[in-house]
Image (cartoon, rainbow, N blue to C red):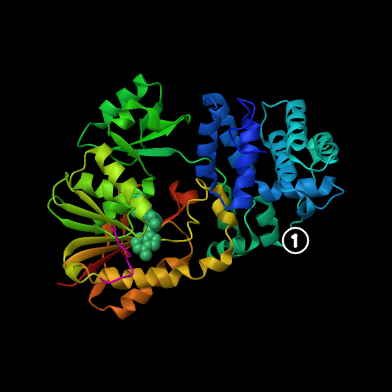
């Protein structure tokens, strides 16, 4: 029971959301990928797909807060509930507390129906009904979160695990950490970079309008547009024709900091799915060479497919571990991009479940990052550039790794770079981008120049 697409009533957005949420928790699936797959296999139409997405992301963004409310109105401890019953409850409370257009009766009844279908316990529908009715009666005076301990308060209020809130509090202080946590739960704009080798921004905007997609020029990034209103962008002919690709503003800024030029030889050492390789190849006018590597063979296919769709002939892909030395690449590249594997805590807006990763396994990441940086630094020609970047906000994966590297490599120094306003000049050659300040993904860029 419960395999998506098998016995789901067509059009049931809530059921798709429930099964996606459970897959994330029980099978470790990533919400964005699981949701896309489930929406597709059930064949939800645009409106239902949008509702399923909002419900799934909304519950993940507010899971700890929703559990706090559920716990206050339940005789059964939240931790003891069956996962699908708990998720049916979360969906119900989320709709009542956060979505203004859904009638309370629909929110309650649909969750009761889901618990009847998916719970083994005949008492579950009664439990769900009782809790949701109690929440609905108390909607105007929901229980308050204890504010005595700021970390605990912020953790529940913005549904971020306590360890992560403490990290942000230590790094930013209370006011700014709260702004970051709030921004993490906001909906980011989708940014598309125009493949200016195929079309101008104006041409793409006109083509998007003709396909009824809401788009506008990016407010400050050249050759980029923002897309709103959802929908499956990959189905648009202007996408399939390779006239744009999707990437966050931060990724574009990283390529701008690296400043690739036509004719260069570039290594993108951790390249899949290929965003920075594509941006680099476009900036190079598709002249020169971009060698795009990834450790995972199945991800190489993503790079190849993207490069082919965008018509970028200067990109060549390979499967290669960036930690393992490759003798023929020593001193061979004008630019090496190390967009290393990281904890991903800068992209919580787009992958809301990333915050619930266990912190234990993340502790090993700086060692991996140092090892990659150490190895690929040998591939940079004297006088060339090594660009280190991550999509996380933890200093131990960012500035600490770069400082460690610079201490060990006096032949490298940081180099200032200039980005469009409102970002401006990174005088130290290092930059952290913040969702609550810059409106981008949380991201770190360090530009390192090898001495001649
Ligand atoms: C942050 S993602 C790269 C995103 C990519 N640069 C882009 O802009 O689309 C990190 C990538 O590094 C790859 N990776 C992880 N460990 C690696 C290693 N030891 N060597 C090479 N690639 C690795 C992962 O498979 C993942 O695709």
Find residue 5 and report its horizontal and vertical position in percent.
58, 32
Find residue 240 and report its horizontal and vertical position in percent.
31, 31
Compared with residue 92, is residue 304 higher up or lower down, i.e. above or below? below
Q: Is 69 left or right of 371, judged from the image as shown? A: right
Find residue 203 and report its horizontal and vertical position in percent.
26, 26
The quadrant holding residue 160 is bottom right
Q: Is 446 left or right of 315, judged from the image as shown? A: right
Q: Nearer the viewer, residue 451 or 31?
A: 31
Compared with residue 415, is residue 313 higher up or lower down, i.e. above or below? above
Residue 289 lies in the magenta stretch: no
Q: Nearer the viewer, residue 325 or 200?
A: 325
Q: Nearer the viewer, residue 38 or 213?
A: 38
Q: Is mark 1 within 8 Å of ligand 1?
A: no
Q: Secondary structure at mark 1?
A: loop
Tell me the quadrant of the picture where the N terminus can be found.
Answer: top right
Query: Can see residue 170?
Result: no
Query: Can see residue 348?
Result: yes
Q: Which residue is mark 1?
A: 148
| Magenta span | 319-325
Q: Is 186 left or right of 445, judged from the image as shown? A: right
Q: Residue furthest top?
A: 210
Q: Is 190 left or right of 319, judged from the image as shown? A: right
Residue plotted at (18% across, 72% down): 451
């Amino acid at each position: 029971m419960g395999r998506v697409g098998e016995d789901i009533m067509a059009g049931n957005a809530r059921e798709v959301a429930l099964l996606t949420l459970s897959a994330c928790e029980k099978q470790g699936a990533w919400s964005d990928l699981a949701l896309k797959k489930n929406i597709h296999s059930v064949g939800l139409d645009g409106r239902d797909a949008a509702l399923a997405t909002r419900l799934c992301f909304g519950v993940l963004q507010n899971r700890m807060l929703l559990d706090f409310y559920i716990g206050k109105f339940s005789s059964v401890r939240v931790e003891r509930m069956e996962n699908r019953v708990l998720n049916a409850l979360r969906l119900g409370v989320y709709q009542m507390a956060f979505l203004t257009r859904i009638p309370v009766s629909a929110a309650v009844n649909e969750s009761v129906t889901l618990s009847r279908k998916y719970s083994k316990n005949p008492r579950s529908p009664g439990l769900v009904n009782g809790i949701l009715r109690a929440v609905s009666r108390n909607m105007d005076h929901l229980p308050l979160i204890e504010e005595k301990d700021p970390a605990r308060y912020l953790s529940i209020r913005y549904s971020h695990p306590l360890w992560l809130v403490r990290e942000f509090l230590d790094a930013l202080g209370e006011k700014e950490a709260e702004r970051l946590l709030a921004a993490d739960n906001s909906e980011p704009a989708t940014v598309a970079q125009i493949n200016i080798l195929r079309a101008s921004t104006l041409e793409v905007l006109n083509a998007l309008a003709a396909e009824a997609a809401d788009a506008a020029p990016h407010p400050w990034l050249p050759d980029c547009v923002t897309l709103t209103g959802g929908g499956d962008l990959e189905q648009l002919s202007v996408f399939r024709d390779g006239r744009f690709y999707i990437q966050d503003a931060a990724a574009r800024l990283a390529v701008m900091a690296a400043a690739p030029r036509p004719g260069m030889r570039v290594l993108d050492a951790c390249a899949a799915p290929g965003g920075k390789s594509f941006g680099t190849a476009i900036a190079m006018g598709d002249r020169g060479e971009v060698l795009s590597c990834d450790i995972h063979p199945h991800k190489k296919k993503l790079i190849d497919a993207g490069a082919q769709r965008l018509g970028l002939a200067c990109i060549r892909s390979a499967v290669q571990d960036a930690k393992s030395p490759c003798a023929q690449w020593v001193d061979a590249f004008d630019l090496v991009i190390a967009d290393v594997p990281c904890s991903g805590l800068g992209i919580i807006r787009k992958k809301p479940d990333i915050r619930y990763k266990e912190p234990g396994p993340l502790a090993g990441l700086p060692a991996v990052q140092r090892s990659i940086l150490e190895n690929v630094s040998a591939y940079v020609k004297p006088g060339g550039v090594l660009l280190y970047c991550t999509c996380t906000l933890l200093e131990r994966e960012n500035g600490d790794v770069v400082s460690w590297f610079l201490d060990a490599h006096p032949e490298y120094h940081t180099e200032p770079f200039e980005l469009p306003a409102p970002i401006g000049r990174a005088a130290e050659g290092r930059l952290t981008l913040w969702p609550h300040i810059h409106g981008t993904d949380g991201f770190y860029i360090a530009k390192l120049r090898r001495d001649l």
